Amino acid sequence: MEENKIEELVYPKDFINKVICGDCAKVMTQIPKEVIDLVVTSPPYDDLRTYKGFSFNFENIAKELFRIVKRGGVVVWVVGDRIYRGNRTLTSFRQAIYFQDIGFKVHDIMIYKKKNTPFMRANAYTNCYEFMFVLSKDSPKTFKPLMEPTKRNGYEMLVTNRKPDGVIKKVVGKLKENKVKTNIWEYAVGLGGTTRDKIAFTVPAAFPEKLAEDHILSWSNENDVVLDPMCGSGTTCKMAKFHNRNYIGIDISEEYCDITRKRLIKEARQITLRS
C-alpha cells in the first residue's frame, strides 16, 4: 500500500481481518483508542536482521500500542539482545522500562527457550532464549492458564498442618494431575517446529506458531481483536484466525504482506476442510 493511501483507511472495515502494508507507527494512528484486545509481535531488534532495510521507531510504536489497546488488554513483546564484543545491549530491558514509563504494567517476564538453537559462543554458554514481555494495560481482563501434567499424581501421604505439639501429621491425599505451566516455554524451531509452511522461512526469524497460539489462548477470547503490527510472515494472524479471533496484520514490506495473505488463504482452506 502506498504511503499516501494510509490516510484513507477506515476502522473497522479496512482493518479487521486484513493485512495492511505500511509503516505501523503511521497505520496505527488510524485505529481508534482502546479497541485492541491482544498484541503478539516481535520487533526487528538491535539490527540483527536487515528486514529488507526497513527500520522502526520504537517509541512511537510503543505509544500507539498503549493508545489503541483496551483497558485490560495485553501486549506480548518477543525480543532479545544483540551481543557485541562480549557485551549485551540490554535493549530488551530498556524497551520494557519505556513501556512501563508510558503506562503499561510489566505483568510478566517470560522466556522463549529454543530447543534446537544453533547459536554457539566461543567463551560463554550457548544462548537459547528470548524474552517475552507480557505488558498489560491495567490488570489483564483475560487469563486462561495453560496446564501441563504433574510429574507425580495419584494418592500419597501428604503433610497437613503442624499441631501445637510440634508433630507433623500426614494424611492420604490426591495429587493434582495437572498444574499451571511455568513462564518458561520451550519450542522447537525450524521447519516442522516453527511451522510447516515453507513460505514463512523467506522472512527472517519467524517465531513458532505454537508460541503465538499459546499466548492467544492465554490472553484472549473468541472474537477478540488480535494485532501484530510487525507481522512478518503472518504467524500471529494465522493462529488468531485458527482460533476464531479477529486479526489485524501490519507490515512495511509488501513482500511480507503477500506471504501473510498466502498463509491466511491456505489456513482458510484448511478450516473449510476441517468443518
Image (cartoon, rainbow, N blue to C red):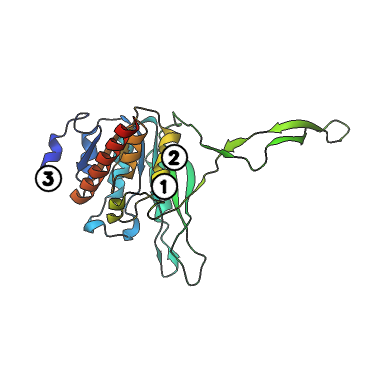
Task: Tell which of 243 and 88 is nearer to you.
Answer: 243
3D distance between C-alphas at marks 2 and 3: 34 Å
Depicted 235 relative to depicted 115: above or below: above
Image side of residue 6 versus residue 46, left or right: left
**Residue underneath mark 1:** 96
Say which amino acid is labelled 1. Answer: Ala
Determine the residue located farthest toward the front in the rendered image: 273
Residue ranking furthest to the bottom: 122
Assign a secondary structure to mark 2: helix
Q: Position of residue 124 (x, y in %)?
A: 51, 68
Sequence order check: which comes first, mark 2 or mark 3? 3
- Amino acid type indicated by mark 2: Asp
Q: Which residue is mark 2?
A: 214
CA distance for labels 2 and 1: 21 Å
Q: Which residue is mark 3?
A: 2
Which quadrant holds the C terminus? top left
Q: Residue at x 30, y 51 (%)?
A: 200
User: Relative to residue 123, is residue 30 depicted above or below?
Assistant: above
- Could you tell me which secondary element the residue under label 1 belongs to? helix
Q: Residues within 10 Å of mark 3 (few under 14, many from 20)?
A: few
* Mark whose residue sits in front, 3 or 1: 3
